Amino acid sequence: MSPQARRERAYHRYVEKQMKQRKREMARAQKEANRQLKRKLKNLQPSDPQLTTSLEDVSPTSYSEPSEPAAPPTSQADTVVPPVTVSASDAIATQDPQQPTRP
């Protein structure tokens, strides 16, 4: 084995070892973070539900009578709209072939 090949092989193993150590450290740190999160969640006590209320001013001056009765709403069953069909081939066929197309 040539000295150059030995150096390349040694460097390759060095890089592999460093990557393996880094991966192992990240896995350990992640495990510890998960343990701490579980401990925190385990120690949490549920809080009592909070209710918020607000009061509005309902004075007689804020209310007004309608001057005319409202028109009865029209039912959708009475209104019929014919279906519309759109085709892309119609738009292409109606275009003048001598006109340049827009990009």
Image (spheres, helix red, strand yellow):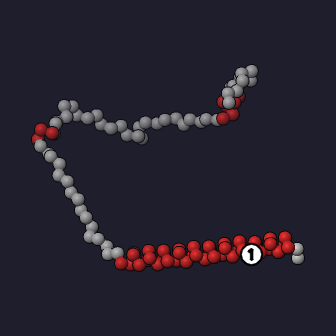
Between residues 23 and 60, which one lies in front from this camera angle?
23
Instruction: Estimate the x, y position of residue 76 in percent, counting from the top left.
Output: 41, 40
As drawn, 53 above or below 100 = below
Classify mark 1: helix, strand or loop. Answer: helix
Between residues 13 and 64, which one lies in front from this camera angle?
13
Whether residue 83 sits left or right of residue 97 in the image: it is: left
Q: Name the image quarter holding residue 68.
A: top left
Residue that mark 1 sits on: 13
As drawn, 14 above or below 70 = below
As drawn, 61 above or below 51 = above
Which residue is found at the position 85% from the left and 73% from the top? 3
Which residue is found at the position 59% from the left and 36% from the top? 85
> The N terminus is located in which quarter?
bottom right
Which residue is found at the position 19% from the left and 31% from the top? 67
> The C terminus is located in which quarter?
top right
Q: Name the image quarter holding residue 65.
A: top left
Instruction: Estimate the x, y position of residue 16 in percent, counting from the top left.
Output: 71, 74
Between residues 39 and 77, which one lies in front from this camera angle?
39
Whether residue 83 sits left or right of residue 13 in the image: it is: left
Residue sitting at the far right: 1
Residue sitting at the far front: 3
